[in-house]
Amino acid sequence: MAAAQFLAEVREVAALEALRANAKAVELLTARRWYVIKSAREASATWAQIGEALGITKQAAHDFYRRKIEEQEKYLSDLHDAAAARAVLEETKED
């Protein structure tokens, strides 16, 4: 009921404004995906499970994470714990 009331009170937005908001939301969520993948791996999720949750292959999930870690090492090396981030890249028997 609260959600319906909230939606009724929200002002209408133009289609382009909605698209800009959508693009920003996707950008923010994608930027944090590596962190959520790291958390899932630390909680013992396999690359196959992560890939399935994302709707991609396990290799695509692994590659996405690896690329993001490499970007962080290149651009944010002083703010990034590379060893912890790379530790979850290792394959396990379950992978």
Image (spheres, rainbow, N blue to C red):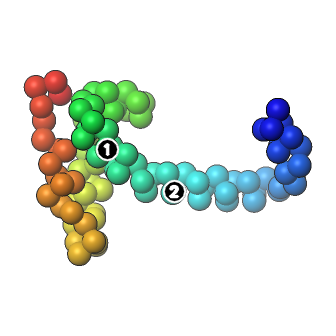
The answer to whether residue 2 is above or below residue 46 is below
Residue drawn at point x = 67 percent, y = 59 percent: 20
User: Amino acid type of disc 2?
Assistant: Glu
Quarter that holds the N terminus: top right
Occupied quadrant, residue 4: top right
Q: CA distance from mark 2 to mark 1?
A: 19 Å
Residue 16 image label:
none
Hey, which residue is sitting farthest top in the picture? 94
Image position, residue 3 (x, y; %)? 78, 38
Instruction: Give the residue number, with chain letter if any, for mark 1.
Output: 39
Q: Secondary structure at mark 2?
A: helix
The answer to whether residue 24 is above or below residue 42 is below
Tag nearer the camera, 2 or 1? 1
Residue drawn at point x = 51 percent, y = 56 percent: 27
First reached walking from the N terminus: tag 2 or tag 1: 2
Instruction: Give the residue number, with chain letter if any, for mark 2.
Output: 27
Residue drawn at point x = 18 percent, y = 61 percent: 82
The count of marks equals 2
Residue drawn at point x = 75 percent, y = 59 percent: 17
Query: Visible in this render: residue 5?
Result: yes
Image position, residue 93 (x, y; %)? 10, 25
